[in-house]
Image: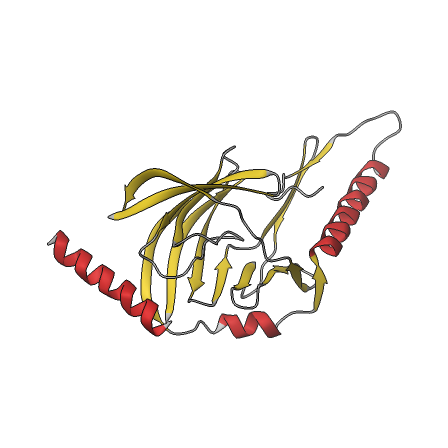
Amino acid sequence: MKIFYLLIFFSFSTLYSQRNEWVKIEYTQILGGQITNSTLFYNQSESVYLFGNQTKIDTTSAEMSYVLSDDIGSVIYKNLNNKILFTRIASKDEVVLVNDEYPVLNWTITSETKNTSNLLLTKAITTFRGRVYIAWFFGKFAGNNGPLKMGGLPGTIVELKTEDGFLNILFNKISFNLTKPDLIDLISTKYDRKISQNQWNYELQKKLNAFKNHVASKQKRNSSIKITFDESLEKFK
């Protein structure tokens, strides 16, 4: 029975690679202690990774948290042929497409393997923006996609984590032979403005500083307050 299942499984994989149809992988994403469901849609030229839209501000003396979302949420889009990558970020005020450089990741593919859901995975390691990433990929899946901004391996990334444990993405299930998701066209059209990654970093830091100054201005004289924000996955200089 297991052999029959695997034959069907690999025939779907081969069919996908020949017809360039869409694949859907569902994950559980744990980022900074927050657990969410995430989804990767991809074919041989495009991919979209949906990972929710949570924004949280947490201070030691006072707590304020809020969740912002729309009907699409946060998405990372990649076009492998044209080397295009952007992140869609939705807030209560606007939807912004943040253009980023398409990453060229220098992977070290190891000899270490493991079996997950009857998939023989191979371990690979790379460094990206201040963190060491450990990926487990399956070479029998066509394409070289993965969650977030990861990719470039000879196969699809099924599991992904950072060495320090800040990120952990776990495989749930996969579906083959899908049509192009409608949300891809919506992502490209339903937004308010486009900016660069550097401009987004600048605007975000400006907003965080304004928030800290606002909180500090409300404190009584001779009192003190310490404000901390959630750590970012990517560490920019």
- Relative image position of residue 38 (x, y in whole percent): 45, 54
Residue 73: tell me if it is visible: no
Q: Quadrant of the N terminus?
A: bottom left
Q: Nearer the viewer, residue 20 or 147?
A: 20
Q: Is residue 31 above or below residue 102?
A: above
- Relative image position of residue 33 (x, y in whole percent): 51, 38
- Residue shown at 82% from the left, 36% from the top: 216
Q: Quadrant of residue 194?
A: bottom right
Q: Quadrant of residue 56?
A: top right
- Residue shown at 49% from the left, 58% from the top: 49
Residue 179: tell me if it is visible: yes
- Relative image position of residue 203 (x, y in whole percent): 76, 53
Q: Quadrant of residue 42?
A: bottom left
Q: Nearer the viewer, residue 218 or 214?
A: 214
Q: Nearer the viewer, residue 214 or 75?
A: 75
28 left or right, relative to 120: right
Q: Residue furthest top?
A: 222
- Relative image position of residue 200 (x, y in whole percent): 72, 55
111 left or right, relative to 60: left
Q: Quadrant of the C terminus?
A: top right
- Residue shown at 64% from the left, 58% from the top: 100
